[in-house]
């Protein structure tokens, strides 16, 4: 398999008839409109590129691989529709082989639409839905026998590391191979120094490979994020076809109402922040350097966890969390305004499937989030049914991780919605939207007395702060940084005093674009 990056020299044109321009991906259109409250262009835009088909690609399959496009993308090759992907945050691929013409220039079009529609999530949320192809685009050229390129955007390999009796490590490797007849998968586990720890070979499409390591070093969060590397080679009739190199870690996680969150058998209070993926004047088209700066900020404030809201984030950021030892709450945009249509339900399940399959091997991911503020527009019966279906899917795809859902602070503690996932989060805004900071302590005391049956996290809490607003007499609602600082001092003391709360997440790490907001004299931004 060969992967060719094709980010450069795309012809871009808006659907409003504006002149075409040449752009380099990643790319977002109308960034300023999305962050200043004016809205910018919403609708279809077209990215077009000419690709000359190499002789080396003869008799091989050619895939177009798009890291993410917001939010619906239709791929057209030489005027022929290939397929449509619905969802603006996950990687997707289309096999374009039969539409490519050898020895000729081939026209690839990606028609991207960021319009709100009731069959694609999110339908409504408190952040800007930027339009564009905002992650890398590649051509992938592969033989017919390969680690699957059609497995919901995954790498085609799923690693299950666990500690057995006596502290011995067992690694099971499940591989998805296209045309597996005559194929073998040769697996090796390497430690951080590149030394061989274990190896095994199995027939493709049969039982998983099993490898054993004596006394493996654990991935232990911020205390030490040790990772091993799986090297997986695919052979067909003895001929080498391709290789995958995937990092993973040994760790155990558990969540209970009595003991809270446990990492490797030790209770760990998780304290962190939520994170959106956008940057001022770049929207979602952020760089690795931007992500590294975000990670540096997370480390600087002492976070040991991050909630990657409200959608699938870039693969590199999950890798950073693996490396730095942050426990990740990863989620899908089943948020705020929901639809009971069959198409919308199918889309939520697809986005959850892609999130889990594409990020299955990251040791940092401890929680799959299946929803946020799902009762904002009412708690209809079908919402419970939808959440149960998604929780069941998450448990089927990945029984080893913890499922969670974030609810509004107004959700009754005995609501059936609170008992679906392994744990729940409440988005609580005492001291900002309602009441005073001290009301948070009263609310938590009441929850503790009512003995809520599932473990409780504070999945959001926070107050707006605009850096230019300073005062010696801070009060709730003045938007000053002074009040924001006072708020966090009080909230931190309250949360520390309540062992009921196994995790808490400040909203948010940084300001982010929210096109419909106008608060504190600032438009298009959540402060």
Image (tube, rainbow, N blue to C red):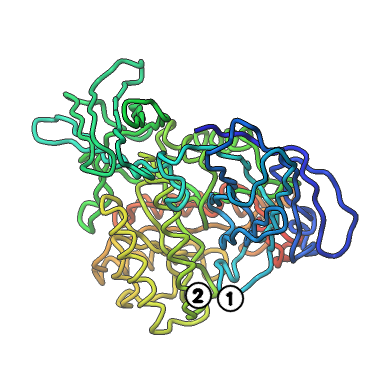
- Judging by the rendered image, the residue that carries numbered circle 2 is 343
Q: Is residue 211 above or below residue 87?
A: above
Q: Quadrant of residue 464?
A: bottom right
Of callouts 1 and 2, which one flags the residue occurring earlier in the amino acid sequence?
1
Q: For this rendering, which residue is in front, 32 or 389?
A: 389
Is any atom of residue 409 visible in this view?
Answer: yes
The answer to which image quadrant residue 381 occupies is bottom left
In the image, is 122 to the left or to the right of 168?
right
How crowded pointer 1 is (Cα within 10 Å; few <14, some 14-19, many 20+) is rated as: some
Q: Dividing the image into 4 quarters, which one contains the C terminus?
A: bottom right
Answer left or right for 183 relative to 485: left
**Residue that appears at 58% across and 47% down:** 97
Disc 2 packing (10 Å; few <14; some 14–19; many ≥20): few
Q: Quadrant of residue 457?
A: bottom left
Residue at the far right in the pictured view: 19
Where is residue 70 drawn, in percent x and y? 64, 57
- Cα separation, mark 1 vs mark 2, equals 8 Å
- Picture coordinates of residue 521, whole percent (x, y): 77, 62
Q: Which residue is mark 1?
A: 118
Where is residue 350 shown, x and y percent of the image? 45, 62
Q: Secondary structure at mark 1?
A: loop
Badge 2 marks a residue whose secondary structure is helix
Left or right, 409 with respect to 455, comes to right
Which numbered tag is attached to residue 67?
Answer: none
Residue 224 seen in the figure: no
Of the two numbered discs 1 and 2 in the rendering, the one whose residue sits closer to the viewer = 2
């Amino acid at each position: 398999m060969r992967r060719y990056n094709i980010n450069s020299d795309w012809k871009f044109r808006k659907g409003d008839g504006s002149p075409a321009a040449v752009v380099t991906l990643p790319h977002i259109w109308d960034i300023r409109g999305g962050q200043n409250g004016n809205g910018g262009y919403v609708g279809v835009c077209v990215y077009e590129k000419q690709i000359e088909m190499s002789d080396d690609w003869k008799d091989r399959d050619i895939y177009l691989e798009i890291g993410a496009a917001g939010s619906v993308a239709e791929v057209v090759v030489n005027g022929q529709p290939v397929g449509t992907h619905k969802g603006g945050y996950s990687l997707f691929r289309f096999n374009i082989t039969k539409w490519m013409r050898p020895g000729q220039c081939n026209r690839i079009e990606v028609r991207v639409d960021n319009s709100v529609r009731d069959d694609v999530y999110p339908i409504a949320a408190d952040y800007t839905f930027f339009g564009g192809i905002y992650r890398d685009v590649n051509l992938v050229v592969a033989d017919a026998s390969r680690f699957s390129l059609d497995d919901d955007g995954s790498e085609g390999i799923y690693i299950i590391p666990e500690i057995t009796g006596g502290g011995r490590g067992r690694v099971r490797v499940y591989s998805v191979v296209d045309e597996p007849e005559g194929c073998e998968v040769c697996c090796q586990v390497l430690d951080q120094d590149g030394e061989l720890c274990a190896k095994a070979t199995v027939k493709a499409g049969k039982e998983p490979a099993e490898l054993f390591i004596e006394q493996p070093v654990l991935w232990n969060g911020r205390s030490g994020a040790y990772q091993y590397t799986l090297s997986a080679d695919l052979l067909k009739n003895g001929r080498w076809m391709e290789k995958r190199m995937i990092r993973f870690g040994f760790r155990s996680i558990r969540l209970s109402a009595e003991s809270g969150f446990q990492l490797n058998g030790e209770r760990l209070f998780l304290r962190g922040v939520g994170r959106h993926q956008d940057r001022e004047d770049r929207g979602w088209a952020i760089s690795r350097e931007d992500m590294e700066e975000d990670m540096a900020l997370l480390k600087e404030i002492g976070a040991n966890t991050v909630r990657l809201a409200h959608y699938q984030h870039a693969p590199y950021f999950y890798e950073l969390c693996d490396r730095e030892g942050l426990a990740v709450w990863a989620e899908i945009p089943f948020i705020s305004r929901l639809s009971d249509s069959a198409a919308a339900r199918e889309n939520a399940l697809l986005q959850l499937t892609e999130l889990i399959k594409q990020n299955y091997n990251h040791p940092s991911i401890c929680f799959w989030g299946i929803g946020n503020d799902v009762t904002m527009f009412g708690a209809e019966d079908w919402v419970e049914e939808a959440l149960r279906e998604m929780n069941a899917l998450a448990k089927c795809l990945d029984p080893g991780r913890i499922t969670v859902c974030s609810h509004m602070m107004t959700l009754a503690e005995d609501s059936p919605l609170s008992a679906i996932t392994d744990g729940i989060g409440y988005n609580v805004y005492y001291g900002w939207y309602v009441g005073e900071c001290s009301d948070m302590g009263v609310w938590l005391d009441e929850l503790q007395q009512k003995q809520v049956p599932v473990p409780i996290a504070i999945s959001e809490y926070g107050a707006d702060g605009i850096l230019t607003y300073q005062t010696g007499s801070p009060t709730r609602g003045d938007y000053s940084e002074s009040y924001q600082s006072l708020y966090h001092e009080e909230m931190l003391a309250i949360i520390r005093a309540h062992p009921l709360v196994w995790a808490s997440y400040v909203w948010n790490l940084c300001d982010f674009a929210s096109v419909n907001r106008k608060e504190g004299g600032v438009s298009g931004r959540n402060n």
